[in-house]
Structures are given as C-alpha cells and as structure tokens.
Amino acid sequence: MACLHANGWGFYAHRLINYQAVFLLPPEMMVLYKPNINFLAEHAVDADKRRYIVEAEASRHYIDLDRYGNFPFDSLPKVWDSAVAKFGEDTLTAHGIVPWHVQAMMSRLTKAFADRNQQQILKLSADIGHYISDAHVPLHACSNYNGQQTNQQGIHAFWESRIPELLAETEFDLWLGTSAYIDKPGTFIWNIVLQSAAAADTVLQMEASLSNKISPDQKFAFEERLGKISRQYSSYFSRQYNNALQGMVERRLRQSMFAVASYWYTAWVNAGKPNLQNLNNTEPTATETADYEALNKAWQSGKMLGREH
Ligand SMILES: [Zn+2]
C-alpha cells in the first residue's frame, strides 16, 4: 500500500473545492476571487502544510464527536466557552475543535474584509475553505478516523483522496447555483459536523461489507495515481464502494463547495459589502512571502506534528 497521508480531503479535493466555490460568488466578489482563483486553489492546502510547523494545528481539522457519547451529542455544549467550562480546553483540543475553529476564522475573514486587506482576505478565504471542507468529511468527525480500530487502515485517504481523484471530474456533477447568506454560521457548521458524524458508520461499514465480498486481489491493484504507478484500492473496488455509498462523496464535495462560497459571501456581507476592486495590501509583503516559503519548506522536508488526520 502506498503511504498516503490522511490529510482531510486530499490535496486534490481541497484545491478543487476552493476553485469551484469561486463560481458561486456574486459578480461584486468575483472581481477579486476570479483573478485569484489559482491562489485560492493552491493555498487550499496551506492548513495541512501548517501541521508540519505548528503543533496546535492538527486539532483544528477534526472533531471526534463519539468521544462525547451518542448522536446528537447533547452532552457537548456547542458554544466554546460553555464547552471549555464543562470539559476543559485540553480535552476539547485532544478531541478536535474544527467547528469552533471555523467560527474563529470567520471572524478573522470578516475583519479582513472590513480592513479591506486584500492579502488577508485571500489567505483567510483559502484557509477557511480548508477547515469548512474538512468538517464535511465523515471520518473527520469520529475517533476511528482511519479505520484503525476496525482493521480498515487506509480508508481515510480512500474516501477523501482516491475516490475524488478517480471520479470527481469524469463522473461527478460539480456545478451548483449560487452561494447563500448564512444567518447563523455557528449553527451551520455544527449541523455539518453532526451530519459527518452520522455518516461515519456508513463509510466504515460499507467498506467492510464490500471487502468481505471482493477478494484482495480485486480490491487492490497497481494503478496510476498522480503520475506514478502504485498499489492502491483498485478502480473497480473504488467504483463499487462509491456506488454503495449512493453518491455520498459527490454530495459532500458539492456541499463543501456551497458552504465555502457561502461563508466567504457571508463574511463579505457582514463586513458591509466593501468594494473589492479597490483594496489595500494588494501584493504580499516580504513577511507574507517568507511565511509561505517557510510553510512549503517545512512541508516538503519535515515531519507532521500531532496526529495525521
Ligand atoms: Zn485538513
């Protein structure tokens, strides 16, 4: 089995989500987002790269909701301060904080719009797109995140990398209408992680029952991925699995794109709909450029801190 990091939606899907989200924006936002669409796609994975230099980064990408009992996890307060009061920050951090982190990022993005700071708007848009998308992945909402408790190691990257890479552009319908204003961004992201947690069992069970029916030599094959031949889940098995999930991967991809565009749009509206054609800080500062370079260097040569998820 090729060593594939379990990285939230894989790099491919994260880039695709941020890219496609741009097309859901109104014209007043498109004037900034369209010319910078490649930046938004490329930097969709900065949040994962940051896990190589920032210890605290890992927990921003997931939440193990099953640590808090059963669906709908009523014992867990959804408001951060109440959750801290009940469980303590260490416990919350250990089990993941993605729904709260999305809300923190939303405040920062709204401020960047209000400050009319182009570089910050783009950077924070790329980053929040990542966290929102991670929240849509079922295995980002349960503690058995890579099937390690059920002898299904590899399922994380299978669901979020292998399937989208194989099917997104050829078989999924990724076109959506427009973004929408989100009245309650906190409630919205909590609903997403609750849906993810509810789907996690299906993600695991379907793989297990297919594996019982399909022999290992049909399940795995040497096939091309990202320009290299490697042993991985076969396209046959991948398609069978995707069918068994009845469109779940496609649906979560589409919902991610809609949610990302809608958070961007909502932050812009909440900041008073600033004119995006005439912003400050249009070019990266020397510090911003150096930060991006440091991030890439750490990612290329380093070791991931915290858990791989
Ligand atoms: Zn991630």
Image: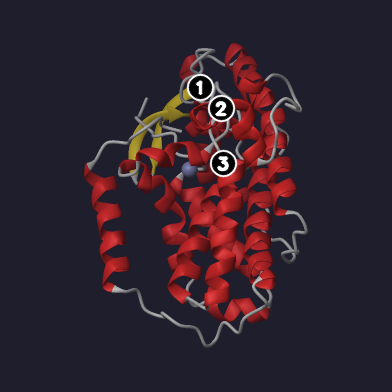
Secondary structure, mark 1, is helix
Residue type at tag 1: Lys
In front: 236, or 133? 133
CA gap, disc 2 to disc 1? 5 Å
Vertical side of 107 occupied by 299: above or below: above
Closest to the camera, between mark 1 and mark 3, is 3
CA gap, disc 1 to disc 3? 33 Å
Percent x, y of residue 144: 55, 21
Secondary structure, mark 3, is helix
Residue occupied by mark 1: 219
Q: Residue at x 28, y 53 (%)?
A: 296
Q: Quadrant of residue 28?
A: bottom right
Residue type at tag 2: Phe
CA gap, disc 3 to disc 2? 31 Å
Classify residue 222 as left or right of residue 86.
left
Q: Residue at x 73, y 66 (%)?
A: 178
Q: Are marks 2 and 1 in contact (CB under 8 Å)?
A: yes
Classify residue 5 as left or right of residue 66.
left
Q: Quadrant of residue 224?
A: top left
Closest to the camera, between mark 3 and mark 2, is 3
Percent x, y of residue 86: 64, 27
Percent x, y of residue 234: 49, 29
